[in-house]
Image (cartoon, rainbow, N blue to C red):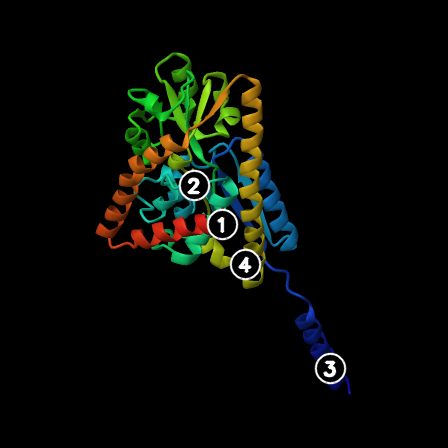
Amino acid sequence: MKRYFSIACVLMFVLCVTLIPVQAEEIKLRYSNMYPPPHPFTKMMEDWAKEIDTKTQGRVKITLFSGGTLTPPMQTFDGTVKGISDLGTALLAYSPGRFPLSEVLTLPLGYNSGYQATKAANAYYKKFMPKEFDDVQVMYFHVSPPGFIMTSKVIGSTEELKGLRIRANAEVADIVKALGGAPVTMPITETYDSVKKGLLDGLLFPVEALKGWKMNEVVTCVLESKATSYGTSLYVVMNKDKWKSISKEDQVVIEKINEEMIEKQGKAWDTATQIAKEESIQKGVKFVAVSAADDAKNLEKVKPILEKYVTDTKAKGLPGDEALKFVQEYLKANP
């Protein structure tokens, strides 16, 4: 009887141990963020991280490293691939040549808003799933509202841009050229002083920069040309191995939160832009709407930029013509 009792006790112990729920291993992720700590987008990322922590019941925790302290913006994508960071966000333009098909998102497509541009970018990715992002797990994309040329003196049309030195990122420098200006590439951190000292006549940038980078202190005019407007495109990606280490259940949770972030981020861009515009008007900055006749000419001037994109991507065996057509049709259907 003692022997049977001992065996029964052992069996009961094994059964109890088996029924005890196993605590999932806590996964800690380092997020490399290019925006400075006070920026409203940094607050959005912090909220995103907190929501993931809450909805995975603490199984996935994210620590934000802001201001490019973990990896500089130009190295964020490679840093995420190599595991220097587990998550990263930066401009597609900071990895020149890395995303040839996705450069469609930075073309002068006549965006109306950050929300429209952000939705279009994510729809494009889901449609084409470009191999250029195969080294990471894409969380989502977001795109700024229309970028316009801003000048230190008030002008009334794009015809007056001829010969003006305009700061522009390399991927949109051709827009300045097409309008007769002289593009100058330099870090955004040097642009304020360059305009103030007269080394630059203006810049090509989203309106949000007027407040976010205090450009409304050195420019006096924003030339609103829909035909030449483009979007600054950003990615949020995760290291592939880190993504695979997360349970399927929690992956589904994160993907749902990402879908919600697409909505929030697109709207946040437009809110930031409106605040920047209102503040800039109060400071005396004039927003000049380009005439329909002027913009019709501008549309013709930037067409070669779109054609070059198609030619370059086709030469690489990529469906640039299909990508361009898709985004253009999406924008028309979703104004």
Q: Amino acid at mark 4?
A: Gln
Whether pointer 4 and pointer 1 mark residues with C-beta atoms closer than 8 Å, the reply is no
Image quadrant holding the N terminus, namely bottom right
Viewer-closest of 143 and 40? 143
**Helix, strand or loop at mark 1:** loop
Q: Amino acid at mark 1?
A: Asn
Q: In which quarter of the view is residue 172 placed?
A: top left
Tag 4 residue:
251
Local crowd size for mark 1, using a 10 Å CA cut-off: few (<14), some (14–19), many (≥20): few
Viewer-closest of 52 and 11? 52
Q: Tell me which label, 4 or 1, sits earlier in the chain.
A: 4
Task: Give the residue at the far front of this rendering.
Answer: 293
Residue 8: numbered disc = 3
Mark 4–mark 1 distance (CA, rounded to whole Å): 29 Å
Marks 3, 1: nearer the viewer = 1
Marks 2, 3: nearer the viewer = 2
Residue beneath the point at 49% across and 46% down: 335
Residue beneath the point at 58% across and 62% down: 249
In the image, is residue 120 above or below residue 194?
below
